[in-house]
């Protein structure tokens, strides 16, 4: 009797425990906050903002293709029917082997390539067979700047405008080079590497201004955006992203939509004394521009240090989006995506300007697949959030309250100084990092190349010494639910759902390209350059490049009238630091935690810097 | 010899042996007087023209190399001075990995101390105005321990990292190899 | 030597000693509500236990005296059960009852003391975070308004009568926070957050001490607690929020330049200057503090000179290195530090 008793009790205990475990394991699905959109007519798509996306002339003059950031080419010679015949036309070695994140530029028969440090600018003559080099411009940035660049010595692109090529160098200079001759027109020193500042972003050139922002949120810099005069290179205005209102260029025109962003001198009041001077808020990502309203839109990077206990307060104006007047720099509105950011969820991702069906007409909005894991659709006149739905697995936040605009944190995942918080999704690079998505007006879908990573985060006190990292965190990243570390998702921004998704073993760190031919192109970190059907996601063609692909693919019309697809393959960036930095993967906290996530990458790819240009055979 | 006498001689001998074995390591807290500088180390891969030979190891090296208090203090300085931010816990990142067997600028303790003090091209900051030479030698001792070079009784036998990696005493490492010459 | 004189000689130093520490660093200081509860409990225990002790001594002496006098006293013989006298039985019962009542009384007193100490802990108006480091105290005053948070070191100012919650953390090893006049001990454990609540009742200056061995300089890790009226406290807090004053003389300017460009800024923070290190004590208002190096020495110009020049001889093993400044540099640095009021 006793034995039966014990056996019964044991069974009940085991079943009970298993049941409890099952209850614990199933994470509650992250909820979508209630939506307040008007009912939409069937079949209506979003379209890119008209003024910001002129007709395609077959060139590629800026990294985003146009001011709306669509990364969409209207060329349609290459279609799902013939893409299987796509073949290599020519190649070019850039003679650098660091992470290559920039797109090639094509302007009327000349291709321009800007490399990572040492930031060489090549001009290739596309009219001649094999595209020989016309000239090389060597800006010779300071070698010591490599020591203060957090995430590989990358460069996210150059811009062509009015006969000049504009680009930034790692040691904080902006250059204007004559597009024909390769001679320097002007250069301006904006950043100071002794403070830990570098510049990696691609400038935006519009309205006679060259807009440049700094990098260094992990080095305790103060973030800013500056406008240089396009002709002379002189500083027209500079707006900081922390500090008193006069430094942030907040004036009478400033009207943030939500109460949480309203107040005087919030850039000082929401920080401990003096912490805003070393508080980050850099501008290292993408800018968009609306020529109609003359407003630039850009996201602000993370506050410093990563350890949140050292900077109580909302830490304005970091991890948010600003709209500014391009001529004066004065702020028009601001929205803070993650007040008092806890997980390095910079908000610098691309901002795609679109017009969506609204009632009887259209509403001017912006699409933002943010690092925090939500796909934001916001009115670009006011910053009001119309919807914020997660486009992957998120457990660090519970959603976005559309009434107050505030993100709802999950307090279980709060990092605390002296302790390790585990299983935070998305990890520090976010659900998607800087690598931009593409928007196709044909399908109305946004093609998002992104991550599926979670992390353990251990916060500790960070010491500030100018020119050295100011982080205060040990991080270890690993694959999220499902085991795949990356994914390529086709997202319907109006219906807020995934249409199709391709799971990838490695994080997808490459930007996307969409074409009118009905194709979407992207690359993987182990070097596969893929063409998939824009409507169904079916893989139609792929090519194994010599190195992982993290650079923007482009499409252009060559001098012979044919459509070309070009991309530079050179693995690196934060995700590829394991390869490029020849790191030792026995330390899982290497590269701010990325080493643990991609321990196998050195076996799958090696460093490189090769341009590949494809076209259909005649 | 009476057994009593033998016993006391034995006791005395054992006491002497035991006391002699207690070789406490010197805990160096004070820097040497003013004017001390960290010597310029030599890269291990250098041509010495005309048949000259490299200078011998700096005499201060043996005060810090294989010295457990120095390695422990170096570990604390390593995170306080933000070395962790660039080199992580030996794996590298912005800076090269310190736990492998490739040393660009030399892996001898005086060469490491020189690299820390003077800075190096391609981004290593110069610390001689911010740290005393005593602190720099302690850091160099700790950096050597990241690649398992000091003896096992001097390094920490507990891994202090958040992910509970393998302690230094259990990981086997090779000898110093020549510097990596392929860097630009 | 009579017994009296021996007693006098023996007790006098004790009494003198108690007087000396009466209000500065004494468990009998009764300067805070917690300490008063503790003191009340202490005297109850002393009283009850003392009374019982006296009883035991009386019975012991009585037993010794009686056995000397009567040969056939009530002795229990071995091997034979001896019927005890009624007097003995009632005395035993009475004694057991007395013990029961005494212990119960002590337990009840202890319970009430503990409950009232806990009750005083509700409704804290002020929150301070104290982080223990080897071998100094990092004090941070918290506030809902982030721009009013303030950081200082080795000195605590408390407003009288205001319940204050002190959150205790450690940056390296286990320490223990103990201000005898105000509260009991509470450990600072790395990776954990402890807290205590203090409601100071007496205005004055008190001394605290690290009470858990934490390394070679554990003995020199003390802190000063100043309890003052609320208005003075707010004034002090506002003053601590001010950045360091700019140098006005060539000597202090030279000191400022050395401090911000040399080794000092790598560890120390001086508000309003480029020196923003966090691993050492905040120096923004160093000269306004009463002691130097966590209570090792009182604050004075001479001690500043000695400390800045060679901390390792004053507090061997401390994390601040002996840099070896030139005399000119030393004059300049100390002149600048003295302006940090």
Image: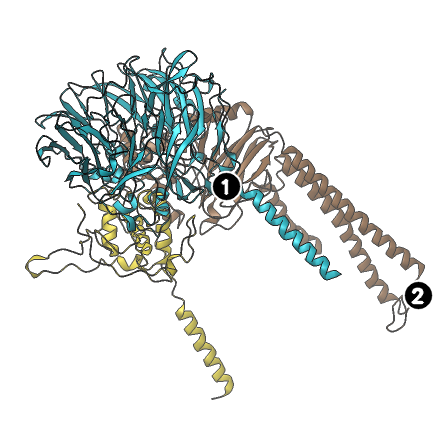
Q: Quadrant of residue B95?
A: top left
Graded by Cα atoms within 10 Å as few (under 14), some (14 to 19) or many (20 or more), the crowding at tag 2 reads few
Q: Quadrant of residue A215?
A: top left
Q: Which chain is brown?
A: C
Dot 1 and dot 2 within a common chain: yes
**Label pair 1/2, CB-CB below 8 angstroms:** no
> In the image, C305: left or right of A568?
right
> In the image, A180: left or right of C71?
left
At a point 9% along the width and 30% down the height, the residue shown is: A127
Residue C31's x, y, as percent? 61, 35
Relative to residue B27, is residue C264 depicted above or below?
above
Graded by Cα atoms within 10 Å as few (under 14), some (14 to 19) or many (20 or more), the crowding at tag 1 reads many
Cα distance in 3D space between marks 1 and 2: 64 Å
Q: Which residue is mark 1?
A: C169
Q: Which residue is mark 2?
A: C83
Q: Which chain is yellow?
A: B
> In the image, A454: left or right of A349?
right
Question: What secondary structure is marked by label 1?
Answer: strand
Residue C3's x, y, as percent? 70, 56
> Which color has been applied to chain A in this rendered view?
cyan
């Amino acid at each position: 009797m006793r034995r039966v008793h014990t056996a019964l009790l044991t069974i009940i205990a085991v079943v009970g425990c298993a049941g409890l475990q099952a209850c614990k394991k199933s994470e509650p699905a992250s909820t979508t906050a209630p939506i307040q959109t008007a009912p939409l007519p069937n079949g209506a798509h979003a379209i890119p903002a008209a003024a910001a996306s002129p007709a395609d002339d077959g060139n590629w003059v800026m990294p985003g293709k146009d001011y709306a950031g669509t990364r969409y080419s209207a060329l349609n010679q290459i279609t799902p029917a013939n893409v299987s015949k796509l073949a290599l036309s020519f190649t070019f070695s850039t003679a650098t082997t660091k992470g290559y994140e920039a797109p090639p530029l094509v302007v009327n028969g000349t291709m321009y390539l800007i490399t990572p440090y040492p930031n060489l600018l090549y001009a290739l003559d596309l009219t001649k067979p094999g595209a020989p080099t016309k000239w090389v411009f060597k800006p010779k940035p300071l070698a010591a700047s490599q020591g203060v660049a957090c995430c590989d010595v990358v460069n996210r692109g150059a811009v062509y405008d009015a006969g000049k090529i504009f680009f930034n160098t790692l040691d904080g200079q902006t250059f204007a080079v004559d597009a024909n001759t390769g001679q320097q027109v002007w250069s301006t020193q904006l950043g100071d590497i002794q403070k830990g500042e570098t510049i990696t972003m691609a400038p935006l050139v519009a309205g006679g201004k060259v807009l440049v922002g700094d990098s260094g949120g992990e080095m305790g810099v103060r973030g800013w955006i500056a406008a240089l005069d396009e002709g002379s290179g002189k500083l027209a205005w500079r707006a900081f992203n922390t500090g008193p209102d006069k430094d942030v260029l907040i004036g009478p025109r400033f009207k943030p939509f939500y109460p949480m962003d309203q107040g005087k001198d919030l850039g000082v009041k929401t920080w401990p004394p003096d912490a805003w001077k070393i508080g980050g808020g850099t501008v290292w990502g993408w800018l968009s521009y609306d020529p109609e309203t003359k407003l630039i839109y850009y996201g602000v990077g993370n506050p410093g240090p990563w350890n949140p206990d050292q900077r109580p307060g909302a830490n304005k104006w970091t991890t948010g989006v600003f709209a500014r007047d391009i001529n004066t720099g004065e702020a028009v509105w601001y929205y803070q995506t993650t007040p008092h950011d806890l997980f390095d969820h910079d908000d610098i991702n691309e901002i795609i300007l679109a017009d969506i069906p609204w009632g009887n007409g259209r509403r001017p909005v912006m699409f933002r697949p943010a690092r925090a894991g939500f796909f934001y659709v916001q009115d670009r006149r006011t910053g009001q959030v119309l919807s914020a739905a997660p486009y992957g697995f998120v457990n660090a936040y519970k959603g976005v309250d559309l009434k107050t605009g505030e993100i709802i944190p999950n307090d279980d995942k709060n990092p605390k100084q002296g302790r390790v918080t585990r299983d935070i999704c998305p990890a520090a690079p976010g659900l998607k990092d800087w690598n931009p998505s593409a928007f196709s007006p044909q399908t109305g879908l946004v093609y998002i190349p992104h991550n599926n990573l979670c992390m353990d985060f251990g916060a500790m006190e960070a010491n500030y010494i100018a020119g050295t990292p100011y982080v205060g965190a040990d991080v270890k990243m690993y694959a999220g639910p499902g085991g795949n570390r990356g994914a390529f998702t086709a997202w319907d921004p109006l219906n807020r759902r995934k249409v199709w998704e391709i799971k990838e073993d490695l994080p997808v760190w490459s930007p996307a390209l969409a074409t009118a031919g009905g194709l979407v192109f992207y690359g993987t970190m182990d070097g596969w350059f893929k063409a998939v059907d824009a409507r169904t996601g079916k893989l139609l063609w792929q090519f194994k490049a010599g190195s992982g692909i993290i650079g923007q693919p482009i499409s252009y019309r060559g001098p012979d009238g044919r459509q070309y697809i070009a991309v530079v393959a050179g693995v690196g960036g934060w995700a590829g630091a394991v390869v490029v930095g020849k790191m030792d993967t026995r330390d899982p906290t290497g590269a701010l935690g990325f080493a643990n996530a991609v321990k196998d990458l050195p076996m799958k790819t090696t460093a490189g810097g090769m341009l590949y240009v494809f076209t259909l055979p005649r | 010899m009476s057994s009593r006498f033998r016993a006391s001689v034995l006791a005395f001998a054992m006491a002497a042996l035991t006391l002699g074995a207690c070789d406490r390591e010197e805990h160096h807290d004070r820097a040497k007087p003013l004017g001390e500088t960290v010597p310029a180390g030599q890269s291990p891969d250098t041509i010495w023209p005309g048949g000259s030979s490299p200078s011998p190891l700096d005499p201060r090296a043996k005060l810090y190399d294989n010295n457990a208090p120095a390695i422990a203090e170096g570990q604390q300085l390593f995170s306080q001075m933000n070395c962790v931010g660039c080199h992580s816990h030996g794996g590298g990142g912005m800076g090269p990995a310190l736990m492998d067997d490739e040393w660009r600028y030399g892996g001898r303790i005086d060469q490491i101390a020189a690299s820390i003090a003077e800075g190096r091209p391609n981004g290593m900051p110069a610390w001689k105005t911010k740290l005393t030479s005593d602190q720099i030698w302690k850091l160099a001792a700790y950096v050597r321990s990241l690649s398992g070079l000091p003896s096992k009784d001097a390094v920490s036998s507990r891994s202090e990292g958040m992910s509970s990696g393998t302690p230094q005493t259990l990981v086997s490492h090779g000898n110093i190899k020549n510097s990596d010459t392929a860097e630009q | 030597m009579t017994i009296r004189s021996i007693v006098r000689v023996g007790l006098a130093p004790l009494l003198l000693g108690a007087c000396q520490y009466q209000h500065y660093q004494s468990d009998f200081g009764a300067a805070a509500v917690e300490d008063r509860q503790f003191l009340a409990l202490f005297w109850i225990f002393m009283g009850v236990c003392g009374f019982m002790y006296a009883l035991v001594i009386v019975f012991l002496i009585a037993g010794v005296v009686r056995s000397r006098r009567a040969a056939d006293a009530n002795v229990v013989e071995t091997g034979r059960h001896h019927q005890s006298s009624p007097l003995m039985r009632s005395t035993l019962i009475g004694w057991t009852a007395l013990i029961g009542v005494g212990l119960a009384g002590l337990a009840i007193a202890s319970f009430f003391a503990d409950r009232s100490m806990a009750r005083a802990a509700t409704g804290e108006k002020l929150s301070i975070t104290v982080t223990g480091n080897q071998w100094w105290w990092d004090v941070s005053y918290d506030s809902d308004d982030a721009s009013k948070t303030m950081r200082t070191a080795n000195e605590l100012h408390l407003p009288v009568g205001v319940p204050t919650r002190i959150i205790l953390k450690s940056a390296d090893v286990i320490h223990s926070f103990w201000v005898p006049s105000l509260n009991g001990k509470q450990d600072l454990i790395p990776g954990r957050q402890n807290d205590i609540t203090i409601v100071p009742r007496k205005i004055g200056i008190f001394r605290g001490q690290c009470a858990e061995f934490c390394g070679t300089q554990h003995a020199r890790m003390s802190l000063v607690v100043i309890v003052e009226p609320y208005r003075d406290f707010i004034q002090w807090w506002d003053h601590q929020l001010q950045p360091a004053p700019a140098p006005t003389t060539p000597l202090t300017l030279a000191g400022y330049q050395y401090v911000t460009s040399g080794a000092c800024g790598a560890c120390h923070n001086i508000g309003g200057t480029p020196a923003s290190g966090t691993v050492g004590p905040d120096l923004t208002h160093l000269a306004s503090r009463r002691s130097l190096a966590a209570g090792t020495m009182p604050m004075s110009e001479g001690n500043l000179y000695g400390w800045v020049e060679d901390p390792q001889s004053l507090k061997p093993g401390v994390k601040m290195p002996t840099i070896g400044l030139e005399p000119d540099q030393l004059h300049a640095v100390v002149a600048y530090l003295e302006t940090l009021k």
